[in-house]
Every structure is written in structure tokens, then in C-alpha cells.
Amino acid sequence: MTCLSVVIPAYNEVNCIAASIEGVLATRASLAAAGIDELEVIVVDDGSRDGTPEIVARYPDVTLVSHPTNYGYGAALKTGFGHARGELCGFLDADGTYPPEAFANLCRAVRDGADVAVGSRRSGATSQMPFVRRVGNAVWSNLITLLTSERVVDPASGMRVFRREVLERLYPLPDGLNFTPVMSTRSVHEGVRVVELPIAYSERVGRSKLRVVRDGVRFLQTVLWTALNYNPVRILGAMGLALGALSVVLAAILVGLRITGVTELSAWGVAAAFAAVVCALGGANLFALGATFNYLVSLFHRRPVRQGLFRKPVFRTPLDRHFWWLGLVSAALGLGLGIAALVLGLNGWAIERLWLYLLAGTMLLLLGFQLVVYWVIMRVLEELSQRETRAQCDAAGRVP
């Protein structure tokens, strides 16, 4: 027998909780046609003060779990999952926006091989989503797609069905409204098979608990932080490349000024020279730090590094394997510029004519030193990761 446990988190939903419960209970026939033998409905009252738990208590077929105070949307869902006994778990919001009848199709998708089936409000079905939320969901969709290289259409959907055992791979999950985008982000990074099916979306009953600015900032923080836990170089490396590109532009301007005979810089010229050095060194550090963190993440998750800055490798071998000779070349160039500046200075050149050589030499020398250091660190981490992999293979009797 296959049981579906549907969790409904509720906080001050006195106006629509009854309709939500009855809508889910009415899906028994369609669920049976989808191969679901039993339906369990769990309502988690998250500290309501408007009579919501009293309404839920009127339904003998519904399990009521109450929080003494408001812990948050995600916390209510996790409490419900802890009380669920079904092989499949599902959830939907209690505000009347999601169609309970869509559970049958979501369950079919899971029974056909998906690990998680998401009711997508952005896949073509009728939607009464407010404009602000529509824009916000488009932002989160594109952000998570950019961070994971996998298309995610509706990362904030509040209606899903998933295999119960998948939770072990997705936890920890946050307690707030950012539960669903983090769940989507972790699903992609963990290699969970996700299917998004179009569902209708209705205007909610009552006032929304979502605060656009506050919750938007929280969504951004947790999504970025989650991505850093799996593929740090995607974020840090992109920031490093952006800073490096800015450094190249500023350096080209300074070189152009020097070629045209400008030897004394204005206040803006000094600021540009300062920014060029900071961006170059900061960009290289961020890129190398991201690559290094990828080895640490691989070691923690006990699996080889299989993610990077881009969807597909740009080079035949990872760029970090070339850090040693790139660093040596950079240091040699920097040292050469420093020696050249010293020789020219001893031959009477004023500092106004030497500042560019000294600045570029210092930057290249420091950059080369950092690249070599990062190369050593990453090779050590790679060796530790390979040892861990070999140990797992030996324990399992497999060839690594």
C-alpha cells in the first residue's frame, strides 16, 4: 500500500483552512486512480491566535499538531514531516491558492520515477499571482538557474510531493518562508530528480504573510549560502572574474595614459591605479578561494569535484592545475619589472616615470605568490579527497 501524507502549515488562516482541508480530503478518488491507497492529512498550527486550531479539530480524519508559538513556515512543515507516516509526503499552503486536485498528477510523476514533483505556477496554467510576486519568482528562478546550471521554473512553489527518503539529502532546511527556494536549490545540487508540472494558482484568501523586502533579502541570503555549500567557485569565481575584468580595463587606461606621455596622475588617476591593483589581487584571490573551497566541499561531501564556474569545462584540465606555472610566470614578470625600475632609477629616471613599472611589478609579484600558494593548498586537498574515495571503495570492495 502507498500512503500520501499531506502537510498543511497554518498560521491565522481561519478564513480558508476549512476549505483547504476539505479540498485535500476530496482528492481521495483521484489519488486512488493515481495508485495512492491511503491519504493522511496533517495540519500544523503554527501558533495561530484566530481560532484556526478549533476549526481543524472539527475534522476527525485530520491530525492536528500545534506549535505553542509561531516558529515559521518551514518549521511547521518540518514538524509535519516528522509526524507523517506515508511513503510519499506532500504539502500545500493553507491560503486557498493551490489546487488540491493537482496532487494526483504530482503523485503520478513521483511514482513514474521523480524524487520530487513541484506544482509550477509559471509553466503555463492559469495564474492569479500578484505582479510583485510574479516578478520575484522570475528573479529567484533565474538566480537559482544561474547558480546551479539547471533550469528551475518555480523555486518558491508551496505545493510539492516527494519521496520521504529524499528528506535526508535535503536537510537542513530553514524555518522561514525561504524553505521552498532552499529546497529547490539543494534538490538540484544533490542530484535529486525534480519534475515541475503546471498548476493553476488562485488569489489568496486573507492577508499575505510575505514581506517583499525583508523576505526577499532572506531568500537571497539563504539561496546564495546554500549554493556556496555545494559549488563555491560558481559565486566566488564569477565575482573574481568580474573584478579581474575591471582591473584589465583600468590597467589599459593607465597604460594608455603612460604611452601618451602622462607621467603625473590626477586624483582620479591615483584612484584608478589603486582600484586596478585592488581589483586584480582581490579578483585573483576570490577565484582561487572559490576553487579551493570546491575541494573542501568535495572532501566534506565525500565525492569528487564535479562542479565548476561554468556548466561545462572551458579547459581540458581544470584551470587550478595551472596555477603553479601561472604563478611563477607572474612572479617572474613582476620581479623583472622591479629590476628594470631599479636599473632605470639608477640611471637617472625620476619616480614620476617609474611609478607604473613599480606598481605593475608589485602587483604581479604578489599575484604570482598567491597563485602558487593556492596551488599547493588545492593539491593537498585533492590528495586527501582521493584518499577518502579510495578508502570508501576499499570498504565497499570496489575498484576506485
Image (cartoon, grey):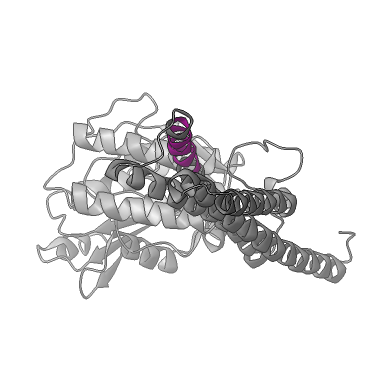
Where residue 269 appears, x then y in whole percent? 34, 41
The C terminus lies in which quarter of the figure? Answer: bottom right
Where residue 294 appears, x then y in whole percent? 61, 57
Image height of 80 relative to 188, above or below: below
| Residue ID at (33%, 47%) | 271
Where residue 192 appears, x then y in whole percent? 58, 48
Q: Is residue 165 left or right of residue 93?
A: right
Toward the viewer: 5 or 364? 364
| Magenta region, residue range | 244-256
Toward the viewer: 399 or 370? 370
Image height of 336 relative to 373, above or below: above
Q: Residue 245 lies in magenta, yes or no?
A: yes
| Residue ID at (25%, 72%) | 67
Residue that sits furthest to the left in the current view = 50
| Residue ID at (40%, 27%) | 123
The N terminus lies in which quarter of the figure? Answer: bottom right
Q: Main secondary structure of the magenta part?
A: helix
Q: Residue 21 lies in magenta, yes or no?
A: no
The quarter of the picture where residue 225 lies is bottom left
Q: Is residue 43 left or right of residue 187?
A: left
Residue that sits furthest to the front in the current view = 348
Number of disc labels: 0
